Image (cartoon, grey):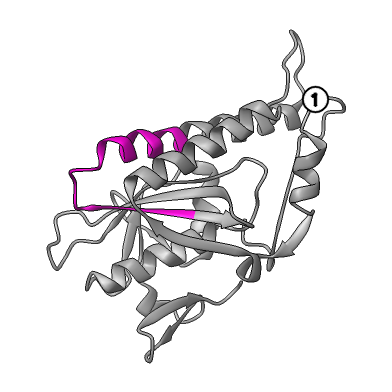
C-alpha cells in the first residue's frame, strides 16, 4: 500500500483462477489518481451496513477468490486467498458492528467510494473520551482487488479525531502484514497498540490551520 498516487485493481497471478466479470474490469481501470477519484464519506450505521454487504457480495459473486486444488502450493495463490479472506472477514466485522451500533454514539463509520461504488470501510471508536486516550480504529478493510486507497480512510479518521478534540491522534491493532504500511504513515508501536500523533509527524502529515484538518502528504 501507499506506494504511489494511484490505486491498482490487482488479481491473482494463477492463470484461469479468477472469474471476474468483464464489466467489473471496465468499471475500474487499472490505475487512477486516488485523491481525485476516491470519495470518503462518514455514514450512519445503516449506510455502512449496506455498503459492507455490497462489497462482500461483489467479491463473492465475481469470483475474486482463487480455487484451491489438493497439492497446489502456489505461493502467490495462497497470498491472494489470504488477502481475500482477511478483507472479507474484516468487512463482515464492520457490517456486524454497524448492525448493532444504532443505539451507540461512540462509533463512527466511514465508507470509501469509487464512482459511487463502495470499495472500503472503517469503523472508529471515540473510546472513553478521556483527554489522554486516543480514538481507536476498530476495523479497516478495502475490496481485495484494491490497492493504495486505505490511507484516505485513515486520513478521514485522523480528521474525525481532530473534530473530537483529540489532536488527530489515533490508535489501532494492526495485522502483521499491514504494519509496514502504518509505519510509513507515521504510526509507532507501543506496548499495546500502534499509535499516530500527526502533529509530531511533519514528514508524513501537513496541518492546515484554516480548515483545522490534516492531510497525508504522499497521495
46 over 33 or under it: above or below: above
Residue at the outermost bottom position: 210
Question: In this orientation, does residue 87 appear?
Answer: no
Q: Is residue 66 or residue 195 the one in the foreground?
A: 66
The percent coordinates of residue 194 (x first, y second) are 37, 55
- Seen in the image, is 93 located left or right of residue 180? left
- Seen in the image, is 106 located left or right of residue 77? left
- Seen in the image, is 197 located left or right of residue 101? right
**Is the N terminus in the top left, top right, bottom left or bottom right quadrant?**
bottom right
User: What span is in magenta?
Assistant: 90-111
219 over 12 or under it: above or below: below
Q: Residue at x 23, y 69 (%)?
A: 164
Q: Residue at x 50, y 51 (%)?
A: 179
- Seen in the image, is 212 located left or right of residue 80? left
Give yes or no for residue 91 being in the magenta stretch: yes
126 over 206 or under it: above or below: above
Q: Secondary structure at mark 1?
A: loop
The percent coordinates of residue 79 (x first, y second) are 67, 33
Q: Residue at x 55, y 77 (%)?
A: 217
Q: Is residue 165 or residue 29 the one in the foreground?
A: 29
Amino acid at each position: 500500500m501507499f506506494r504511489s498516487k494511484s490505486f491498482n485493481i490487482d488479481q491473482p497471478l494463477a492463470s484461469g483462477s479468477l472469474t471476474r466479470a468483464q464489466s467489473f474490469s471496465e468499471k475500474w481501470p487499472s490505475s487512477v489518481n486516488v485523491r481525485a477519484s476516491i470519495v470518503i464519506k462518514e455514514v450512519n450505521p445503516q449506510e455502512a451496513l449496506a455498503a459492507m454487504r455490497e462489497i462482500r457480495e461483489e467479491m463473492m459473486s465475481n469470483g475474486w477468490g482463487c480455487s484451491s486444488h489438493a497439492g497446489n502450493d502456489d505461493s502467490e495463490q495462497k497470498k491472494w486467498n489470504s488477502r481475500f479472506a482477511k478483507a472479507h472477514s474484516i468487512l463482515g466485522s464492520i457490517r456486524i458492528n454497524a448492525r448493532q451500533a444504532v443505539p451507540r454514539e461512540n462509533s463512527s463509520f466511514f465508507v470509501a467510494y469509487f464512482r459511487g461504488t463502495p470499495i472500503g470501510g472503517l469503523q472508529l471508536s471515540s473510546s472513553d473520551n478521556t483527554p489522554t486516550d486516543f480514538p481507536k480504529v476498530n476495523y479497516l478493510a478495502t475490496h481485495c482487488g484494491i490497492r493504495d486507497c486505505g490511507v484516505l480512510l485513515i486520513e478521514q479518521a485522523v480528521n474525525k479525531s481532530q473534530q473530537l478534540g483529540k489532536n488527530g491522534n489515533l490508535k489501532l491493532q494492526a495485522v502483521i502484514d499491514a504494519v509496514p504500511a502504518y509505519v510509513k504513515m507515521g504510526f509507532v508501536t507501543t506496548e499495546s497498540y500502534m499509535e499516530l500523533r500527526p502533529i509530531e509527524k511533519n514528514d508524513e502529515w501537513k496541518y492546515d490551520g484554516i480548515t483545522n484538518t490534516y492531510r497525508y502528504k504522499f497521495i
